Image: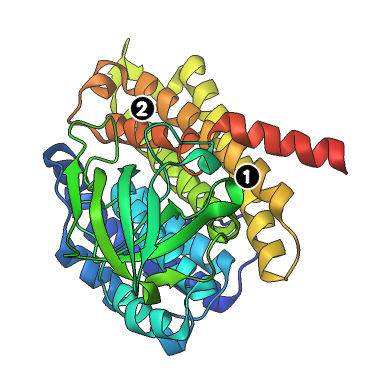
Amino acid sequence: MPLMTHTELTQEESTLQAEAREFAQKRLAHGALDRDLAGTFSCELYEEAAEAGFIGVKIPESLGGRGLGLFDECLVMEELAGGDPSFALTISISAGLCGGHLLHHGSDAQKNSHIPHLTKGKIGAWAITERIAGSHAAALECEAKQHGDAYIINGAKMFVTQGMGFDSLVIFARTLAGKDGISAFLIEKGDRGCRSVPLAQTLGMRSAGTAEIFFQNCETPVERLIGEEGDGLRQAMQVLNDGRVVLSAMCVGIAQASLEAAASHAKKREAFGKPVSDFGGLRGMMADSAIDIATSREMVVAAARIRDAGGDNREEVALAKLFASEACLRVCDRGIQIHGGYGYIAETPAGMFWRDARVFTLGEGTSEVHRNLVCRHLFDS
């Protein structure tokens, strides 16, 4: 069924949504579970998505994107996530965080040399998290020291999506003491002193190439400093604001796909001589899931529309990220329950959706961080 039918869409938005849904259902959904179980990523499909214009929806046309808004990107990412969550996550990191970071904070040379490649199918990564510095980004220990016309980087980054297969990587490293001493740098595939190690057997997002990246005297030219020294955290927060809206849209897409799979199973599965969809308990769970999805979608729409209109949407972003991520997990958990024992088998979409959904209450700000953000807006207003 088409998604986001509750809100009035323009003809252009409806067309974009339909194109993304067709690609997700015809090209991504079939094989998504196999890729998940094998832990493999399809570069061929990724290049197809690039050719179809689904990578870099809000990147300017001059740099290879569609030049559309955040709402348009959310339409696309909701659909793609329903087909293959790991695939959608890769796009959100590559074009959204890596490409978006370069777009808003990079030099003209950095933009022109990297962003067009990302929109054409090269993969970007974005690394801020460390073993001891997750939600507390200001505590990171990875260091970058200038030596002549280069910076020497030492340290490590954890939980890097597509850390195994990136072409361009934005990282954050300490150049001075304190929270104002963190800077952003651009790393390229093949740079000496940069080594990726796969994180095997992650609970979910198994085909997204999650890795830990080690930097040992990794030398990067001063031209690859993004913006000014000490401006890294401010840049990160700006980029994450849009990223969290997109992530929330992905949660809606995964939840919708999980509910559709559960409803399909419930109509086919019989118990006591009738479809289990006739039982009140399961119908109640599906109704609750539909409510969770509709509410999440409205929050995403509000956050995206305000941003596209040039307004301050930070409060709406915190609400959307918190609610949509937790609602997605609830919906996927109910999906397993509705499938019964079949939902507990790894080789089913129901299990994949639940495992993939679990990361969203952690990534790009935990639920606890977003509860604090919501309260900050509440008490500071």
Q: CA distance from mark 2 to mark 1?
A: 29 Å
Q: Which residue is mark 1?
A: 320
Residue drawn at the location 42% of the way across and 69% of the way down: 99
- In this picture, is 205 found above or below 302? above
Residue 36, image quadrant: top left
**Foreground: 105 or 254?**
105
Residue drawn at the location 19% of the way across and 57% of the way down: 165
- In this picture, is 16 found above or below 324? below
Mark 1 is on which residue type? Ala
Note whether residue 1 is visible: no
Q: Residue furthest front?
A: 148
Q: Residue furthest top?
A: 272
Residue drawn at the location 48% of the way across and 66% of the way down: 101
**Foreground: 185 or 85?**
185
Mark 2 is on which residue type? Ala
Residue 293: x and y in percent read 55, 40
Q: In what element is the residue under mark 2?
A: helix
Left or right relative to 100: residue 203: left
Residue 200, image quadrant: top left
Identify the mark nearer the N-term, 2 or 1.
2
Note whether residue 143 is visible: yes
Q: Which residue is mark 2?
A: 266
Q: Count of labels shown?
A: 2
